[in-house]
Image (cartoon, rainbow, N blue to C red):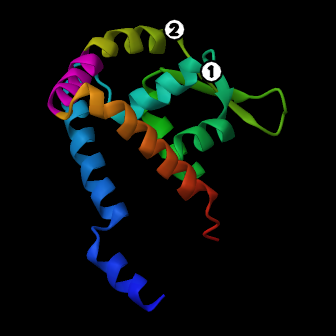
Amino acid sequence: MKGQKGITESLPCAAGTLRRASRSLTRLYDVHLARVGLTTTQLSILRTIQRHGGRMPLAQLALDLVFERTSLYRALSPLRRGRLLTVRTGSDRRAKDVVLTPRARRRIAAAMPHWAAAQQLVLDRFGRAAWLPFAEQLGYLTAIARSIDVA
C-alpha cells in the first residue's frame, strides 16, 4: 500500500483534468449555440426532456443530468422565463414534472444544426474512431463516481 500513494500522486488529477476539458468544450459549444439563445447546459436539459417524450419528473431529470436539485432549479429558471418549459404537478401529487413547450421544440430544432457544427469540429480534431471508446469510458467513469457513497 505504501507504494500506491506515490503512483497516485504522480498521475494527473482525474477531476481537474475532466473539469478543464469540460469547461473548454462547453465554451466551444456555447459559442455555437448562442446563435439561437441557448447554452450547452440548457440544450442538454431540453434534449433530455425531449428524449423522455417531452415530459419527465424533476427528480429523474436531476438524476439523469447528475444535478443537485437546487442547481437544477437555477438552471431551469431561464428556460421557464423564456417559456421553453413548464413545471407541473406530476402523476404523484408530491412530485413535479418538467414539460417542454412547443416553443422549446422549435428552439431545439433551430439549435441542432449549431450543435452539430460544434460536434463536427470536435470529432474532426479528436478523431471519430477515438471518440466512441472514449465516450464509453467516460460513461463508466460517471457510473463509478455515482456508485461511490460520498455522504
Q: Does residue 57 lie above or below 37 as drawn?
A: below
Q: Residue 42: x percent and y percent?
A: 41, 31
Q: Is residue 73 magenta?
A: no
Q: Is residue 34 visible?
A: no
Q: Which of marks 1 and 2 is in front?
A: 1
Determine the residue positioned at 54% across, 58% down.
145
Give the quadrant of residue 90: top right
What is the CA distance from the residue labelled 1 to the residue labelled 2?
Answer: 15 Å
Q: Residue 89: x percent and y percent?
A: 75, 29
Q: Does residue 36 lie above or below 58 as drawn?
A: above
Q: Residue 52, labelled with which disc?
A: 1
Q: Residue 118: x percent and y percent?
A: 22, 25
Q: Which of marks 1 and 2 is nearer the N terminus?
A: 1
Q: What stretch is highlighted in magenta?
A: 114-125
| 48 relative position to 15: left or right | right
Q: Residue 126, labelled with which disc?
A: none
